[in-house]
Amino acid sequence: CCTPLPGDKIIGYITRGRGVSVHKADCKSLQDAGVERERLIEVEWEQEASAAYDADIRISAVNRSGLLADVSLYFASVDVNVQAISAHPSKTLNGMSIINMTITIKNTQQLEKIIRDLKSKPDIDEVYRIAQ
């Protein structure tokens, strides 16, 4: 539900019939009254993990011709696959666009670098990971 990534602090929850589900340590669904605390277990990321993970990000940028092309070119240049993308004009920020993307990454360090890189681009106002 909260899509943890390598580098996030995580915790396991022993489910009924589905094994262990892994959540970010601060996952809101683990705060529910129905969560049985005795079913929480310590888990950790594998040190040599080579898996890929989907991460959702939101970009707020000046609405201009070529914006999506520039963002797409950036992801191609750093060899990061874009799984999904949607864009629309901001309803609250005049002249701005909101771009939601699902990208495939290796860990939180890679995601943090992507966010820093994008924030340094002209016309990009804000970039952040969307918390599930």
Image (cartoon, grey):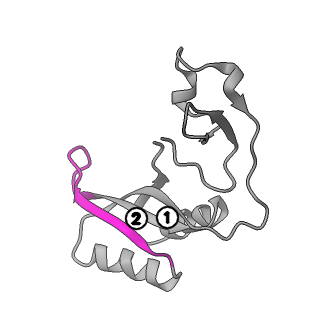
In the image, is residue 70 part of the stretch drawn in magenta? no
Give the answer, above or below, for where 18 lies relative to 84: above
Most extreme residue toward the right is 47
Residue type at the position of mark 1: Lys
Residue at mark 1 to residue at mark 2: CA–CA distance:
6 Å
62 sits to left or right of 54: left
Q: Earlier in the sequence, mark 1 or mark 2?
A: 1
| Residue at (22% x, 51% y) in the render | 94
Give the answer, above or below, for where 48 lies relative to 44: below
| Residue at (69% x, 29% y) in the render | 40
| Residue at (41% x, 58% y) in the render | 125
Q: Tag count in the figure?
A: 2
Residue 115 is situated, as x and y percent measured from the top left of the image, at 53, 63
Residue type at the position of mark 2: Ile
Residue 61 is situated, as x and y percent measured from the top left of the image, at 34, 62
Element assignment for label 2: strand
Which quadrant would residue 58 be assigned to in this image? bottom left
Q: Which residues are magenta?
A: 80-97
| Residue at (61% x, 54% y) in the render | 5
Mark 2 sits on what residue? 124
Callouts 1 and 2 close, C-beta under 8 Å:
yes
**Quadrant containing the C terminus in the rendered view:** top left
| Label number found at residue 48 | none
Mark 1 sits on what residue? 119
77 sits to left or right of 47: left
Residue 50 is situated, as x and y percent measured from the top left of the image, at 67, 71
